Amino acid sequence: MNYSLDIDKKYFSTIGNFFSPIVLSSLEKNSYSSYFSEVCKTSGLLKNIDVSISLRDFLDTIFHFLLKNYRNEYIYKNIIANKILLGKHSLKSSQFLTEFRVGNNKADIIILNGTATVYEIKSEYDTFYRLKKQINSYSKAFEFVNIITSPSQIEKAFQELPENIGILSFTDRNTISTFRKPKSNLDNINLSLLFDSLRKDEYLQIIKTYYESIPNVPNTKIFEACKKLYWEIPLEKAVKLTNEILKKRNYSNYTIQNINKVPFSLVAYVLSLGNKRNRVENTLKILNKKLIEII
């Protein structure tokens, strides 16, 4: 379903926020979002679109409009989810993590399969101001690190990034082009930094798997006791165990079985819900409602 949308540029950013977790979770839980409704009405969108279409078709229409006119961070994330995760891997054997904390930074996307690969997004609306610190942090926690950016910033990426960092371009044809493949950071991984990124249940499981037990210490001392033991695991083994445990932040079987029912525009969002089956079910249900019922 194609619509020719005549929207003032000043609304591009606010329309892009339709794909933010706050707006989508509000639609999912309440069948309504005051932000969504207000922007639809004030931006002129409703003059261009038949309000009897489904929310599914509406969001796909908005996504493709943004793809041509305002490629924000979510557009990049969703293209990576569709073209790299679903295009090259399997949900049964791969994990898609977003906003993963590493030290003082959050990696945009990590894809885990046999190894761990970071994709840091720098869209045409982003600067490289913090990029070196971000890349340095991710390189100490994961084996492969990429930056994906716009064609206009490729030359700058080559100038500022070390040779071990992969450089990808989100092209004007909406494809992903590889300018430089990443090199392994395995020997440089800092187990202390990686450990600090884990949840308590995750590091306990790693320690129990490797040592067959967990330290018999008071709860207030369990973190430091486990961290000390984690440091003593051989590097490659610790990284392998960590990747395996992170892959268990998995999707429900329902998500895997129904991913083909998720509209192209919402693949990254649905995958970010992880194993929360109820939220995935609710999202798919609300997508079948007519736009007029929601606004």
Image (spheres, helix red, strand yellow):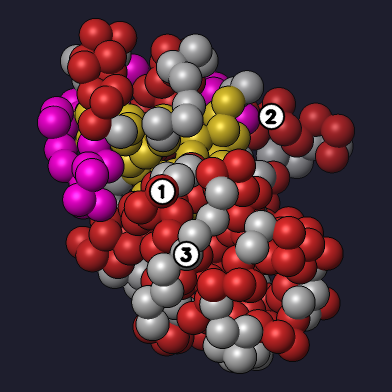
**Mark nearer the N terminus (1 vs 3):** 3
> Residue at the spot x=26%, y=59% of the render?
83
Residue 267 pos. (x, y %): 45, 67
Looking at the picture, does residue 223 appear above or below residue 272?
Answer: above
Evaluate whether residue 10 shows in this view.
yes
Quadrant for residue 139, please give it: top left
- What residue is shown with label 2? 225
Amino acid type assigned to the residue bearing label 1 in the image: Asn
**Mark nearer the N terminus (1 vs 2):** 1
Amino acid type assigned to the residue bearing label 2 in the image: Ala
- As rendered, which of 28 and 279 lies closer to the eye? 28
Q: Nearer the viewer, mark 2 or mark 3?
A: 3
Few, some or many C-alpha atoms within 10 Å of disc 2 (few <14, some 14-19, many ≥20)? some
Residue 17 pos. (x, y %): 63, 52
Left or right for 116, reference 96: left
Count how many numbered circles sit on residues in the image: 3
Looking at the picture, does residue 190 appear above or below residue 249?
Answer: above
Q: Secondary structure at mark 3?
A: loop
Mark-to-mark CA distance, 1 and 2: 52 Å
- What residue is shown with label 1? 69
- As rendered, which of 255 and 292 lies closer to the eye? 292
Q: Are marks 1 and 2 in contact (CB under 8 Å)?
A: no
In the image, which disc is placed on residue 5?
3
Mark-to-mark CA distance, 2 and 3: 59 Å
Question: What segment is highlighted magenta in the picture?
Answer: 169-196
Mark-to-mark CA distance, 1 and 3: 11 Å
Residue 63 pos. (x, y %): 46, 62
> Residue at the spot x=16%, y=42% of the render?
177
Amino acid type assigned to the residue bearing label 3 in the image: Leu
Q: Nearer the viewer, mark 1 or mark 2?
A: 1
